């Protein structure tokens, strides 16, 4: 018996030791692969571009704000397939600009593989492609299995759109879908205690209502309708169609059309198989049929976007994600804006004599009201040094995202950006019903003061406590609207008329004075360079620094492992679990736009 016990113990020890060695060995291999693929630091390796090359935009990759050391992309390099899972918008724009100016690049080939991006990101890419066409070079787009709506919005810029003879095209319009969870909360005995300002501040609705309010439906119908018609008009203009006719086609379930009908309706130009598409590209680039095409990727053609500037430059500071969003249960915080770190970065740039101005790239639904105020103060102090500040809005710059934008000297947005949502709310879970009646746990308390147990688990707020919280939210709203009024140089009452938590599209936001100019990050940088009198040969540098590649991979690995295990255990309840964890982990007072899924 003892012998068997010793064998089991020794076997366990040897097994654990071998597992450790394997993990260490794999880690070393991954580290060397990453270092080999990334070079030293974040420097970009020079790629030789041969004559008659084609810039290939693969729309199968997810598009993020900024290229970085994505762990998944590193794994793809290790596998040897060379296919990135994500591309930075900054990389795509740089590559398109360089392609226009490089005599060795003949044109751009857009491969439609199911793009996942928001309308503002797509609008930015379209504008860059239209600028590229001024060079006189061609753009061709192809859908092998089919072309989805997001692909088509970008591909419609092309001179010619090709599709597989058995492929499909999907154009169906836009929608937003919001899950309302009050019935679920009622069943489990959970109630949300809400204090808010703004009849349109609908971020709390899914937790306290069974269905969408009239005010929320009104604002969504307005901004979705405006964005959709902007998309329709853009496609119709490039395809030489009538927007009304195109909209009617979208109601006809284009996905079910025969491919020949797509040509008849001028939605595509020709039906070809992939091999035939490659022959078309060979003919355009004077490459023999027996030879391979000379494709270059955006990463190959983009400038070194993370290179350090030498001397005077403009700081491009990225503020992406929820402001001080809750950490998930697996430990590392989800992507978001750490207000303390971002403020510290801005103060460092303020005191750097080489930094002559700043562009804040905002892509955020908002978040903590406290964190938003800290970032606002840092920007104001930066401006007090006499350095110009512009904001470039991405897909979202709403609620707290607008709070940190409003004090900029100039605000740029896309026509399809979602912004506004100037409002504030507090949401405190009441689990007294769950604890007392569902779980059968009585929470007894002893307190020295009337409000001594305020916020304790199982204790709901009293009317007096809720009134005090409402007063706190009211004060926060007054401060928020004042910040906006001061930043936009208008009366506070005029801000309140367009506030109330209402979400606006970029077009309307410009009409009502929340935005100054349509454009992207490049236009914002050019504006700051002009204000700072840097001339035409100005430099930029991105901040904050990109995370170390090995740590990024390790964090991603640990997070993914935990999420996969938890998802396997919880099944369909996993998404609800994550949402509840975000609610419980957030600040109590928030500047946050409604959470919803956009269907595009």
Image (spheres, rainbow, N blue to C red):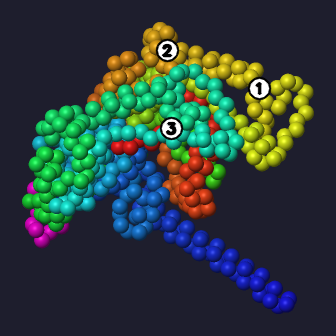
Location of residue 557 in the rendering, given as x and y in whole percent from the top left corner: 55, 60
Does residue 261 show up magenta in the picture? no
The CA distance from mark 3 to mark 1 is: 28 Å
**Left or right of residue 584, residue 364 in this image:** left
Q: Which residue is mark 2?
A: 496
Q: Secondary structure at mark 2?
A: helix
| Quadrant in the picture for residue 537 | top left
Q: Quadrant of the C terminus?
A: top left
Location of residue 513 in the rendering, given as x and y in whole percent from the top left corner: 38, 17
Location of residue 326 in the rendering, given as x and y in whole percent from the top left corner: 61, 42
Location of residue 117 in the rendering, given as x and y in whole percent from the top left corner: 37, 45
In the rendered structure, which segment of residues is drawn in magenta? 284-294
Question: Which is more foreground, mark 3 or mark 1?
Answer: 1
Q: Secondary structure at mark 3?
A: loop
Does residue 293 show up magenta in the picture? yes
Name the magenta segment's main secondary structure. Answer: loop
Q: Which residue is mark 3?
A: 595
Q: Residue at x 84, y 28 (%)?
A: 452
- Mark 3, residues whose alpha carbon is within 10 Å: few (<14), some, or many (≥20)? some
Residues marked 3 and 2 touching at CB (< 8 Å): no
Ranked by sequence position, the earlier of labels 3 and 1 is 1
- In this picture, is 386 found above or below 232? above
Depth check, front residue: 349 or 269: 269
Q: Is residue 155 visible?
A: yes
Q: Residue at x 91, y 33 (%)?
A: 446
Q: Quadrant of the N terminus?
A: bottom right
**Left or right of residue 51, residue 529 in this image:** right
Depth check, front residue: 25 or 139: 139
Q: Residue at x 78, y 35 (%)?
A: 459
Q: How many marks?
A: 3
Q: Is residue 338 visible?
A: no
Q: Which residue is mark 1?
A: 462
């Amino acid at each position: 018996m003892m012998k068997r016990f010793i064998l089991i113990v020794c076997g366990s020890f040897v097994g654990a030791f071998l597992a450790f060695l394997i993990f260490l060995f794999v880690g070393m291999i991954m580290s060397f692969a990453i270092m080999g693929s990334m070079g030293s630091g974040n420097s970009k390796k020079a790629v030789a571009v041969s004559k008659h090359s084609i810039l290939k935009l693969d729309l199968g990759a997810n598009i993020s704000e900024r290229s970085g050391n994505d762990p998944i992309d590193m794994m793809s390099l290790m596998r040897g397939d060379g296919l990135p899972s994500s591309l930075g918008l900054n990389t795509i724009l740089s590559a398109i600009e360089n392609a226009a100016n490089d005599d060795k690049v003949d044109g751009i080939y857009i491969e439609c593989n199911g793009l996942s991006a928001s309308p503002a990101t797509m609008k930015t890419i379209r504008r860059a492609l239209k600028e590229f066409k001024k060079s006189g070079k061609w753009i061709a787009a192809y859908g092998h299995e089919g072309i989805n709506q997001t692909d088509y919005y970008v591909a419609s810029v092309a001179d010619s759109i090709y599709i597989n003879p058995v492929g499909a095209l999907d154009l169906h319009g836009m929608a937003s879908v919001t899950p309302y969870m009050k019935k679920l909360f009622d069943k489990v005995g959970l109630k949300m205690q809400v204090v808010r300002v703004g009849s349109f501040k609908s971020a709390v609705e899914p937790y306290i209502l069974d269905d969408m309010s009239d005010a929320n439906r009104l604002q969504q119908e307005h901004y979705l309708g405006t964005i959709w018609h902007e998309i329709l008009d853009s496609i119709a203009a490039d395809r030489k169609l009538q927007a009304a006719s195109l909209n009617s086609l979208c109601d006809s379930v284009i996905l079910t059309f025969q491919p020949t009908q797509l040509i008849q309706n001028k939605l595509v130009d020709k039906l070809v198989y992939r091999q035939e598409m490659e022959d078309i590209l060979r003919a355009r680039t004077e490459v023999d049929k027996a030879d391979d095409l000379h494709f270059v990727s955006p990463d190959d053609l983009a400038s070194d976007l993370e290179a350090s500037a030498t001397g005077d430059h403009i700081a491009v500071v990225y503020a992406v994600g929820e402001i001080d969003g809750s950490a998930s249960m697996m430990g590392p915080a989800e992507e978001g804006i750490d207000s303390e770190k971002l403020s510290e970065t801005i103060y460092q740039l303020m005191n750097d004599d080489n930094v002559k101005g700043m562009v804040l790239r905002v892509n955020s639904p908002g978040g903590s009201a406290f964190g938003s105020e800290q970032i606002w103060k840092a920007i104001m102090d930066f401006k007090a040094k006499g350095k110009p500040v512009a904001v470039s809005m991405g897909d979202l710059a709403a609620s707290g995202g607008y709070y940190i934008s409003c004090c900029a000297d100039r605000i740029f947005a896309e026509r399809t950006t979602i912004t506004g949502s100037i409002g504030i709310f507090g949401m405190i879970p009441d689990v007294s019903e769950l604890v007392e009646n569902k779980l059968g746990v009585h929470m007894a308390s002893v307190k020295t003061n009337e409000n001594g147990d305020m916020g304790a688990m199982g204790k709901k707020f009293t009317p007096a406590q809720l009134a005090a919280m409402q007063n706190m939210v009211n004060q926060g709203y007054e401060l928020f609207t004042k910040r906006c009024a001061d930043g936009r140089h208008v009366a506070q009452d005029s801000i309140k008329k367009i506030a109330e938590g209402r979400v606006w599209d970029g077009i309307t936001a410009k009409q009502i004075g929340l935005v100054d100019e349509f454009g992207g990050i490049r236009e914002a940088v050019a504006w700051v360079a002009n204000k700072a009198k840097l001339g035409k040969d100005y430099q930029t540098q991105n901040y904050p620094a990109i995370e170390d590649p090995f740590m990024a991979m390790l964090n991603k690995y640990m997070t993914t492992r935990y999420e996969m295990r938890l998802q396997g255990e919880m099944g369909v309840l996993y998404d609800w679990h994550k949402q509840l964890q975000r609610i419980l982990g957030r600040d109590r007072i928030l500047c946050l736009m409604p959470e919803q899924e956009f269907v595009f």
